[in-house]
Image (cartoon, coloured by chain):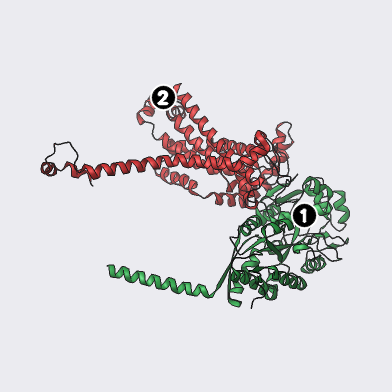
Amino acid sequence: MPPSATLAPDAIAASGSPPGLRRGSASGAMGDAIFAAACRIAGLLVLALLGAIIIGLFIGGLPAFRAFGFGFVFSTEWDPVQEVFGAGVSIYGTVITAVLALVLAVPLAFGVAFYLTELAPAWLRRPVGTAVELLAAVPSIIYGMWGFFLIVPFMAQTVQPFVIDTLGELPLIGDLFAGPPFGTGIFTAALILAIMVLPFIAATMRDVFETVPAVYKESAYGLGCTQWEVVRSVVLPYTRISVVGGIMLGLGRALGETMAVTFVIGNANRISTSLFGPGNTIASVIALEFGESELGSLKLSALLALGFLLFVISFIVLAASRFLLRQRRKA
Amino acid sequence: MSNRILALAAGLVASISLSMGAVAQQATITGAGASFPNPLYQKWGEAARSAINIQLNYQSVGSGAGQAQIRNRTVDFGASDAPMTAEQLQEHNLLQFPATMGSLVAIVNVPGVEDHKMRLTGEVLADIYLGKITKWNDPRLVEMNPGLSLPNLAIAPVYRADGSGTTFVWVSYLSAVSGDFKTRVGVGTSVRWPSGTGARGNEGVAGTVRNVRGAIGYVEHAYAMQNKLVTTQLRNRAGNYVEPTTAAFQAAAANADWTAPNFAASLIDTQGATSWPIVSPTFILLPRNPTDATRAQNVMKFFDWAFRSGDATATELDYIPVPEAVENAIRAAWATIQVDGKPVWPAN
């Protein structure tokens, strides 16, 4: 029933009820009740679904947790033949690639957002902005193929031999760049991830930079501030929370990214001191090993346990970002 | 309007019953499992549709999943690269037989080394993958390759990162020839590699070997042929260096001991002066107590036809046909598949 019907004056007069009271309450009230219940179920369904996934993963991973105890999280063994499994290497790989990706992507994203909101001529803002958004729409398997067939040979034949021959010889930091130039590895994975999370961070930053009231910026310019000073002292403090939110969004995507990373990370269960060394991530191990894991085997259980841990890591990242933001808001 | 809906519905019903009639004439069988023989099964399936009126629906889901699906009887047959053990077959009441064979080759990327030129032994391969031999000019490699000038270049071993039957066969060979490899790594569809880097699938291994100077990897022979990769010679059990050719693969098949229970013959490092050392059969799993006699019969009809008229297709795709004597033994073994105490094969 359209709500305007209750306001029609002749209808109120005809029913004789006092103005302000609703007409046709029987069906209307029932409709409201049904609608409210449907909305409540929809809301609770999300919560139930999330809980069911966590519980499902935990129950699936229970045999592995029982067999290896708490040490599962730190153990660096992964030997399917002897049935000894540990998550240490893949947790390390997941965190290090995601953090490296942010180190590469955040300055670039800031540059893109700064350029688009402050520097770019008006006619260029739209096409560049749309291009950034389209970058986010590219399926991750495309990034994987592009990385494997273009970036990896480029790294293997040009970048890595050069870096290994120069920086690799230095004391202390030399270890970071040692090893054979496979082209794949932690660094290449981080590079691809950085390109993948860049549009998320850049788009968020651009949107929030645009929310800064023009009068604030103009006041600052009026006081004689340079463009950089305006961004540093006015725009960034005003948008800090949303900027951190955008970075966290990127981190969340980087942690769980599967296909693109699987193509370029080198897939070895070893912790290498070199950035060019092969490694693996939780998501890549699950993707690679799931197909040949037998039903009810300890290996399958270990993979489900890995999935549970990835869930926990993502949760910790989200909780930490919320906590940090609250601290800043108080200050 | 309701008339039009009625007419539409009637047309729909008619067309459905028509298409169902067409399907009913063609018997369908379903299978799932190993991805390695998938190209051959698809080709056989295509040809069988017109030749014997059987439509094959094969899902290439991996050996592990194939075993699981036939244990749960969700398909008419399972396919697996690794044979199941006698106890497993007994427990799940399954019959196992080889459908075809394939071979693995080592591929290398060493400057100045051409196809079929480098000589390798199983022991040296095992030590390369264990990280014990790290340079291409290692004295052992130089000694067995007097005709090549090998560079002072780091060896970069590449392996399959995804669990796969190919890895199972490769590590079976390395474990058979090297006690050290057997104790430190062992046999499985995925193992703990002490050195090197992993890549996804045959194409990933081939791509990485192509990109990295000094790399060595392993792929199925068919894949190496199609992509013109640089393969090597291997020393067989008799002590001869052999090139990866169809004749060498067939020699290995002929020299295998097919009397092994459940046809689980090992074609790894077989006897024979000209045998290629890394050949592997891929298996079909059939329930011994099928619920549907007709479908079970159609599966056997399909493989009987494939054994009789599919050899040319197999050779074309670089697979190795099962020897004829073994095919006859397989047909004899089908007699143990029974419904209500009566054998389903031969069909009558």
Chain ID for label 2? Answer: A
Q: Residue at x 40, y 71 (%)?
A: B13
The location of residue B175, given as percent across then percent down, is: 80, 52
Residue kind at label 1, given as amino acid type? Ser
Q: Residue at x 58, y 46 (%)?
A: A258
Residue B291: mark: none
Q: Which residue is mark 1?
A: B172
Q: Which residue is mark 2?
A: A224
| Residues packed near mark 2 inside 10 Å, few (<14), some (14 to 19) or many (20 plus) | few
The location of residue A243, given as percent across then percent down, is: 47, 33
Residue kind at label 2, given as amino acid type? Gly
Vertical placement of residue A293 versus A72, above or below? below
| B275 or A13: nearer the viewer | A13
Which chain: red? A
SS of the residue at dot 1?
Answer: helix
| B249 or B24: nearer the viewer | B24
Is residue A110 something that shows in the picture?
A: no
Which chain: green? B
Query: Are circles 1 and 2 on residues that touch, CB within 8 Å?
Result: no
Real-space Cα separation, disc 1 to disc 2, in angstroms: 75 Å
| Residues packed near mark 1 inside 10 Å, few (<14), some (14 to 19) or many (20 plus) | many
| A215 or B323: nearer the viewer | B323
Image side of residue B24 versus residue A117, left or right: right
Q: Quadrant of the C terminus of chain B?
A: bottom right
The location of residue B154, given as percent across then percent down, is: 78, 46
Q: Residue at x 49, y 32 (%)?
A: A244
| B99 or B340: nearer the viewer | B340
